[in-house]
């Protein structure tokens, strides 16, 4: 976590797929970035809800 005196170029809210992708792209531009999430770990909705479909974004017949 950034200290109070550290300046950041960007702040990303949410550590799900989109937030982690944004972190990756911003760091690729050599920007200093901090990610904040309500959960204790990364993964967003996919991590917290544990959907029955085994793959990210994959729809199975039972999930339709």
Image (spheres, helix red, strand yellow):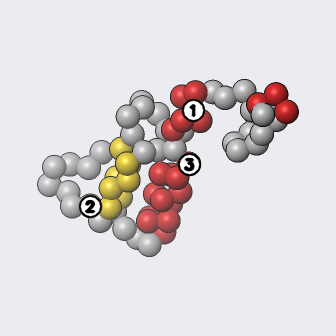
- The residue under label 2 is 8
Q: Residue at x 77, y 39 (%)?
A: 59
- The residue under label 3 is 17
Residue 30 location (% of width, % of height) = 41, 70
Find numbered disc 3 in the image and state the secondary structure of the residue it sits on.
Answer: helix
The quadrant holding residue 61 is top right
- The residue under label 1 is 47
Q: What whole-number distance in Å separates the C-alpha atoms at marks 2 and 3?
A: 21 Å
Question: Would you place residue 54 above or below residue 17 in this image?
Answer: above
Residue 56 location (% of width, % of height) = 69, 42
Find numbered disc 1 in the image and state the secondary structure of the residue it sits on.
Answer: helix
Instruction: Give the foreground label among 2 and 3.
Output: 3
Q: Neighbour class for label 2 at 10 Å: few (<14), some, many (≥20)?
A: few
Find numbered disc 2 in the image and state the secondary structure of the residue it sits on.
Answer: loop
- Tell me if label 2 and label 3 are in contact, CB under 8 Å: no
Residue at far bottom of view: 29
- Tell me if label 1 and label 2 are in contact, CB under 8 Å: no
Q: Earlier in the sequence, mark 1 or mark 2?
A: 2
């Amino acid at each position: 976590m950034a200290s109070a005196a550290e300046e950041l170029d960007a702040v990303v809210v949410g550590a799900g797929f989109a937030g982690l992708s944004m972190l990756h792209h911003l760091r690729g531009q050599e920007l200093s970035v901090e990610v904040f999430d309500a959960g204790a770990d990364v993964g967003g909705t996919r991590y917290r809800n544990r959907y029955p479909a085994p793959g990210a974004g994959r729809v199975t017949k039972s999930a339709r």
